[in-house]
Image (cartoon, rainbow, N blue to C red):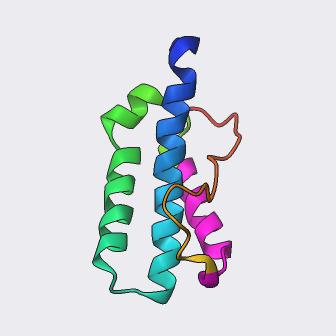
Amino acid sequence: MTDETADLRMAIVRQAADDYIRAKKLLKIQPDNCLAQRTVREVREFIGGKWYATICDINPDFLLRALDAKADRAQAGTAGDAPGRSVSEPPETTDRR
């Protein structure tokens, strides 16, 4: 993968991670929230899919475990973070597929 696209590729993954954590936090206080359930499902499908594998070298299982752990540690009181606010960044890792 070329360095010219690295920032864009990581921004896509970072946004998916932010959306996932925000949705998981919301589900802690509103377990029936359909939008949050859909977001979690769609991000999991994205991270497990071919397009993610094309743009990112971080092992998808590792990333999902890290995101789940971060969401589990997060306080439920911050589940309503405003859209666009950075909640997390993908973990720094050398764990590659």
Q: Where is residue 44 in the image (x, y as percent from the top left)?
A: 38, 55
Q: Position of residue 54 (x, y in %)?
A: 40, 26
Residue at 44% across / 28% down in the picture? 55
Towards the viewer: 37 or 50? 37
Please identify the quarter of the rendering in which residue 36 is found: bottom left
Q: Magenta residues?
A: 62-77
Magenta run includes residue 67: yes
Rendered view: 76 above or below 49: below
Rendered view: 80 above or below 65: below
Towards the viewer: 12 or 68? 12
- Can residue 57 be seen here? The reply is no
- Can residue 63 be seen here? The reply is yes
Residue at 46% across / 49% down in the picture? 16
93 sits to left or right of 23: right
Towards the viewer: 48 or 26? 26
Residue at 48% across / 72% down in the picture? 24
Q: Is the magenta stretch mostly helix, strand or loop?
A: helix
Rendered view: 12 above or below 83: above
Q: Position of residue 60 (x, y in %)?
A: 48, 45
Residue at 50% across / 18% down in the picture? 5
Numbered disc total:
0
Q: Where is residue 61 in the image (x, y as percent from the top left)?
A: 50, 50
